[in-house]
Amino acid sequence: MSSETSYFAIGVTGLVGSHFLNLATKSSNVNKIVTLSRREPVLDKSGNNKTVFEPIVSKDTDEWPEIIKSKLNIPENSTIFSSFGTTRKNAGSAENFVKIDHDINVNAFKAAKESGKFSTAVLVSSLGANKDSMFLYLSTKGKIEEDLKALKFTRTIILQPGMLLGERTVSKGLGNSLGERVGRFFRGTFVEGYIGSPIYAEEVAKAVLFLTQQPIDKPGEVLVVKSKELVDLVRKNKL
């Protein structure tokens, strides 16, 4: 059974986050969504309920924790959602990548926990995330996951999608574009499981709304949902 939910979200100008924002502002089960971003998020023109939407724009991410702790007009037992992230190429260096991808996420979740207003925390991570991975991207995602778990929200939901499909406003490079073409081609065939179960970004966003609007089964629960499980969830519930 779903229920009316309030959300605070970061990463809403990216591929998954933009879909989440637009779906949330159209949902009758959402009574409020507050966003924090470095630039103004964009709503599409089809049926959004702007009365539930409150955007906050701050280019200085160092200010974000204080904004989250003390300046959010949001009820208790809300949900914090993050699909915030970058790439090593866009960050300019490995050090900057970790500072942006790990630190901004973790500091946001810490501030949300300290505010006392959030019962559920949701992170869009990555298939293969592991703090001990030899790959910077996957090890960073794994460390974010571990730091989030340590905060012990009443419910923690970690999504680990594989190849994300969808139209991007900013390219992630030729390799990603070629990978997405392969993902689209094999999507829905017996091969999809062998290539990490590609999933559309909009489907990930739909899964977030579905999962967060279910009752909490057990305080302190941690749900880690891998890409195949996400695809199955979307298909089973016709999201």
Image: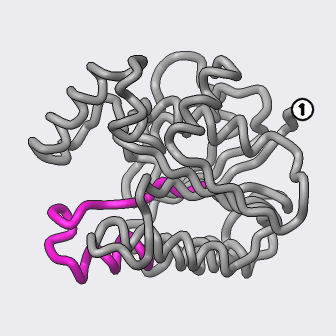
At 45% across and 39% down in the image, what residue appears? Answer: 18
For the stretch drawn in magenta, what is the main secondary structure? Answer: helix
The residue lying furthest to the left in this view is: 174
Q: Is residue 17 above or below residue 219?
A: above
Q: How is the image coloured?
A: one colour
Q: In what element is the residue under mark 1?
A: loop
The residue under label 1 is 1
Q: Position of residue 8 (x, y in %)?
A: 65, 55
Inspect this view and state whether residue 196 appears: yes
Q: Position of residue 60 (x, y in %)?
A: 38, 74
At 69% across and 76% down in the image, what residue appears? Answer: 70
Residue 84 is one of the magenta-drawn residues: yes
Left or right of residue 238: residue 213? right
At 38% across and 73% down in the image, what residue appears? Answer: 140
Front residue of 189/153: it is: 189
Q: Specify the quadrant that holds the N terminus.
A: top right
Q: Is residue 132 above or below residue 157?
A: below
Q: Is residue 38 above or below residue 233?
A: below
Inspect this view and state whether residue 56 appears: no
Left or right of residue 191: residue 224? right
Front residue of 27/129: it is: 129
Left or right of residue 120: residue 168? left
Range of residues picked out in magenta: 81-103
At 38% across and 28% down in the image, what residue appears? Answer: 192
Q: Position of residue 206 (x, y in %)?
A: 60, 32
Q: Position of residue 82 (x, y in %)?
A: 54, 57
Residue 87 is one of the magenta-drawn residues: yes
* The quadrant where residue 75 appears: bottom right
- Badge 1: how crowded within 10 Å, few (<14), some, or many (20+)? few
